[in-house]
Image (cartoon, helix red, strand yellow):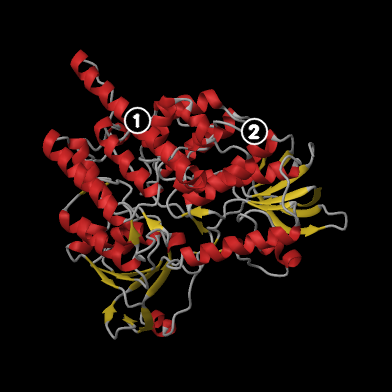
């Protein structure tokens, strides 16, 4: 119903897009943010004397095209990885472009939220500067306070003896740069993305660098191939959504799509050859990495593993070995991917010593592992994550924490249709902001009466089915309940919202189809159709992002992905790889050579 007032807790990337999506449905958002500016995790703490979760060297692990909102595409930027300050600037541009500043209330801490007898929400806030407490009534409540507020700091057996001997235990939430490690013997505990970032800086600065993990990280380098311009999320958008686009079309429909895709690829290949004859270059390689980092000339060329990190056979071999050890044979996306591969060469050369047996206990001056080994260390860096805590909802929900997989699509509480959560869907590989935007669009549509939820018994059954699927699929990320599959979750959300483009819509525009099929993940896909769509802008944006590979390689890539989508097994796909080998030998095609190497690294 239009005109409803909605309280939003948190003004980070999730809260900001929530304001915009609520406005789209005629609702009235009021956003409360603890800090003095927006940003959440990416809050700009510089020159303010405050701490921030983001550290100095942070470069986003997914590209700008996957971090951006669908209603504010980064036009003309190609595909590259933003530094955290660039992303903070993008958020401010989004806020100003849509005039959202008037809905933001800074320096406000939400103390308590209580559901009233008439179904509304009584929200108590406190101004952190004046101390003034205010109580207001709202028609709905949307929780966007984020997953990085309360550090999960474990208590170690033997911790007192370690501290008394002069040891230091710290958490990644307070980390800023590697200076704190100089002259120290440091062990990093944890195997998430923060650990991957920080353990490298431990290796570069500490006298001794150790890494204790229970399970090895599943590394999928953000610089996907040895070509610096091809990002992890930079290829095969349509082909990476096979379940949504092809499997539900049936075998016959899938064959039609496959035939059409290969036909378009061959047409592009023929046009490319004609263009070469006529002196035109009709295929564009994405050089945006080099454009984005001009201060590193030559550092991001064809032989680099990550930002300024030299590639090597030994590094790629280690990544593959770790992936095989941590993955099930039937499914390799079964835990959260680590996209920062910059630490790998330091593991290869022995600078970082890895123990995968797991932590056992501490003693004075040492850490002991479950396999009986130990390391003498002065400092422990805990990269142990954060708690999903909702203390301002504790009285209402009768618990300080909830498993977000018990919410409908990680978003809507089954007991309160006017209580939503935004930001608790974390794709294993893909952007949280896209998922958050879709969550906000779903919640706004429900409040406005445009989207009807299933009745309660069916809703609970759907929640149970989704939870069972996610628990089983991501069994290698136990306790990380926010993790979802980008390629399952986002299409499912888009279909509920009504913004998922039909296959036939794409087939009607061969050029758009070609760019969607062979381009990378891009939020504009969710603005091609449906409510509040921007079809002209979205289509033009998708077509403007240079394709990562030449048309010749795309013929083979299209064939490979379509066989994947149609359910062909390993032997048949090996045949396609053999075809690519032949293409490399016949045409000496650099793009094909890169593709061949990349197919061996893909997470399936």
User: In this picture, is 378 found above or below 311?
Assistant: below
| 399 vs 10, nearest the viewer | 399
Quadrant where the image shows the N terminus? top right
User: In this picture, is 281 found above or below 578?
Assistant: above
In this figure, which residue is indicated by the disc labeled 2? 531
Q: Nearer the viewer, mark 1 or mark 2?
A: 1
Quadrant where the image shows the C terminus? bottom left
For label 2, count other residues whose C-alpha is less than 10 Å away and answer few (under 14), some (14-19) or many (20+). some
Does residue 151 appear in this view? no
- Residue lying farthest to the front in this orientation: 252
* Residue 198 x, y percent position in the rendering: 35, 59
The residue tagged with tag 2: helix, strand or loop?
loop
For label 1, count other residues whose C-alpha is less than 10 Å away and answer few (under 14), some (14-19) or many (20+). some
Q: How many marks?
A: 2
| 390 vs 318, nearest the viewer | 318
* Residue 384 x, y percent position in the rendering: 44, 67
Considering only order in the chain, which callout, 2 or 1, is on the residue closer to the N terminus? 1
Residue in the picture at 20% in, 59% down? 317
Residue in the picture at 29% in, 35% down? 554
User: In this picture, is 310 found above or below 71?
Assistant: below
| 64 vs 101, nearest the viewer | 64
Q: Is residue 519 left or right of residue 1?
A: left
* Residue 68 x, y percent position in the rendering: 48, 38
Q: Which mark is residue 263?
A: 1
| 593 vs 205, nearest the viewer | 593
Does residue 9 appear in this view? yes
Q: CA distance from mark 1 to mark 2?
A: 32 Å
Q: Which mark is residue 397?
A: none
The residue tagged with tag 1: helix, strand or loop?
helix
């Amino acid at each position: 119903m239009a005109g409803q007032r909605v309280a939003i807790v948190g003004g980070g990337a999730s809260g900001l897009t929530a304001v915009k999506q609520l406005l789209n449905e005629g609702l009235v958002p009021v956003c409360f943010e603890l800090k003095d500016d927006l940003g959440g995790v990416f809050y700009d703490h510089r020159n303010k004397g405050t701490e921030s979760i983001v550290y100095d060297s942070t470069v986003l692990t997914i590209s700008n095209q996957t971090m951006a909102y669908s209603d504010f595409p980064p036009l003309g930027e190609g595909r590259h990885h933003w530094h955290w300050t660039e992303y903070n600037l993008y958020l401010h541009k989004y806020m100003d472009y849509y005039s959202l500043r008037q809905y933001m209330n800074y320096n406000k801490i939400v103390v308590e939220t209580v559901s009233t007898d008439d179904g509304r929400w009584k929200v108590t806030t406190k101004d952190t500067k004046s101390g003034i407490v205010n109580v207001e009534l709202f028609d709905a409540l949307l929780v966007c306070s984020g997953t990085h507020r309360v550090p999960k700091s474990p208590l170690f057996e033997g911790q007192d003896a370690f501290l008394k001997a002069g040891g230091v235990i710290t958490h990644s939430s307070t980390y800023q740069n590697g200076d704190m490690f100089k002259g120290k013997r440091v062990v990093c505990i944890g195997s998430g993305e923060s650990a991957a970032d920080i353990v490298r800086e431990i290796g570069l600065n500490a006298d001794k660098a150790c890494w204790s993990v229970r399970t090895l990280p599943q590394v999928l380098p953000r610089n996907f191939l040895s070509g610096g311009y091809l990002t992890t999320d930079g290829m095969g958008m349509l082909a990476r959504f096979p379940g949504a686009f092809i499997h539900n079309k049936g075998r016959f429909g899938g064959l039609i799509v496959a035939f059409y895709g290969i036909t378009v690829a061959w047409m592009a290949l023929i046009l490319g050859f004609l263009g070469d004859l006529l002196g035109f270059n009709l295929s564009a390689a994405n050089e945006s990495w080099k454009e984005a980092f001009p201060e590193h000339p030559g550092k991001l060329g064809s032989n680099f593993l990550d930002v300024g990190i030299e590639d090597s056979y030994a590094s790629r071999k280690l990544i593959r070995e770790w992936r095989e050890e941590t993955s099930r044979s039937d499914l390799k996306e079964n835990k959260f991917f680590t996209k920062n591969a910059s630490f790998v060469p330091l593991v290869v050369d022995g600078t970082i010593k890895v123990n995968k047996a797991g932590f056992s206990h501490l003693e004075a001056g040492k850490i002991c592992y479950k396999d009986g080994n130990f390391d003498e260390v002065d400092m422990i860096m805990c990269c142990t994550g954060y708690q999903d805590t909702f203390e301002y909802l504790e009285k209402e929900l009768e618990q300080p924490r909830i498993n977000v997989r018990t919410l409908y699509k990680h978003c809507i509480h089954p007991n309160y249709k006017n209580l939503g959560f935004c930001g608790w869907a974390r794709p294993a590989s893909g952007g949280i902001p896209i998922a958050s935007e879709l969550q906000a669009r779903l919640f706004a549509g429900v409040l406005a009466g445009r989207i009807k939820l299933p009745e309660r018994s069916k809703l609970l059954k759907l929640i149970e089915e989704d939870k069972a699927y996610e628990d089983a699929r991501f069994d290698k990320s136990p306790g990380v309940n926010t993790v979802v599959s980008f390629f399952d979750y986002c299409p499912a959300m888009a279909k509920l919202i009504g913004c998922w483009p039909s296959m036939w819509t794409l087939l009607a525009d061969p050029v758009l189809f070609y760019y969607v099929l062979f381009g990378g993940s891009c939020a504009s896909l969710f603005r091609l159709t449906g409510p509040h769509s921007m079809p002209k802008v979205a289509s033009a944006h998708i077509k403007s992002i240079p394709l990562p590979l030449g048309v010749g390689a795309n013929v083979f890539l299209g064939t490979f992905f379509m066989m994947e989508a149609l359910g062909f097994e390993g032997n048949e796909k090996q045949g396609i790889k053999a075809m690519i080998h032949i293409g490399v030998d016949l045409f000496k095609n650099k793009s094909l050579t890169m593709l061949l190497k990349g197919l061996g690294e893909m997470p399936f």
